């Protein structure tokens, strides 16, 4: 299933947050606590609810603490998006290193990450809310995209136009599916699908169709 492993990680994340609420912070952990608090807010209440004061209140610290660590709200959002890309890159690294790695596993992980982290996933691609030149964001995003490129059989930092087309083609496919899923645009299709068809089943059908008709990812 697309979401099984990532939903387990999400539950562990929730346990971590609850534990942190009863644990005194030391200075080195405050930045992480604020990022965790910010993610809790967007998961629970949505992105519009996240402010510097809300993050401080959720973390149980001074309202001035977020400004000290992130400067302003775009700074906090950008660092949170960087956390998302770093977390996703770690999952892709684990998948690529597995001897059981199969074709399209990176694509499955992409959609699974979006399903388990909808608010964070959408923030990661909200350039209008982010400081896209912030070094931490640039580095985390580049690492994640490098693993996606490897999943498409591209291992060079200067790909050819054909290789770039392969990367963008695969990315467009999986990102488009993820956004349709998060926007509930797949529900009408699932309503007319054979009984018992899940989002996972539909995505597998998309991958199978792609293998037959359009792109041919490296195996």
Image (tube, grey):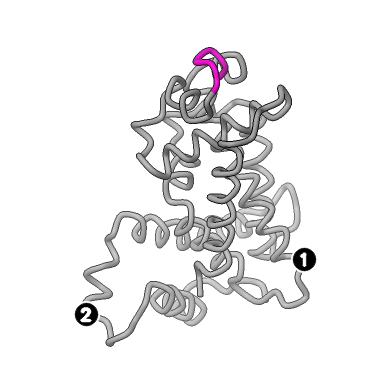
Which quadrant holds residue 45? top left
The residue located at (61%, 65%) in the rendering is: 106
Whether 64 is among the magenta residues is: yes
Which element is circle 1 on?
A: helix
As drawn, the residue found furthest toward the front would be 22
The residue wearing badge 2 is 192
Q: Position of residue 131 (x, y in %)?
A: 53, 25
Whether 77 is among the magenta residues is: no
Q: CA distance from mark 1 to mark 2?
A: 38 Å
The residue wearing badge 1 is 97
Which element is circle 2 on?
A: helix
Q: How many labels, in total?
A: 2
Q: Nearer the viewer, residue 104 or 5?
A: 5
As drawn, is 170 to the left or to the right of 44? right
Magenta residues span 61-66
Q: Position of residue 201 (x, y in %)?
A: 41, 79
Name the main secondary structure of what is drawn in magenta. loop
The residue located at (62%, 42%) in the rendering is: 141
The residue located at (68%, 37%) in the rendering is: 139
Q: Position of residue 183 (x, y in %)?
A: 31, 54
């Amino acid at each position: 299933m697309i979401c099984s492993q990532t939903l387990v990680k999400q539950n562990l994340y929730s346990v971590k947050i609850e534990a942190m609420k009863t644990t005194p912070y030391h200075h080195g952990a405050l930045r992480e606590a604020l990022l965790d608090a910010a993610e809790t807010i967007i998961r629970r209440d949505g992105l519009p609810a996240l402010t510097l004061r809300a993050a401080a209140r959720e973390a149980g610290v001074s309202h001035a603490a977020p400004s000290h660590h992130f400067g302003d709200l775009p700074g906090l959002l950008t660092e949170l998006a960087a956390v998302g890309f770093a977390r996703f890159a770690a999952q892709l690294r684990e998948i690529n290193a597995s001897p059981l790695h199969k074709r399209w596993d990176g694509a499955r992980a992409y959609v699974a990450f979006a399903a388990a982290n909808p608010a964070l996933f959408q923030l990661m691609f909200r350039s209008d809310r982010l400081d896209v030149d912030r070094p931490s964001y640039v580095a985390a995003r580049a690492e994640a995209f490098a693993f996606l490129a490897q999943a498409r059989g591209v291992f060079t930092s200067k790909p050819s136009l054909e290789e770039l087309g392969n990367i963008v083609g695969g990315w467009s496919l999986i990102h488009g599916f993820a956004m349709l899923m998060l926007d509930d645009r797949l529900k009408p299709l699932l309503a007319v699908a054979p009984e018992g068809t899940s989002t996972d089943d539909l995505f597998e059908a998309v991958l199978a169709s792609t293998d037959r008709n359009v792109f041919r990812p490296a195996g």
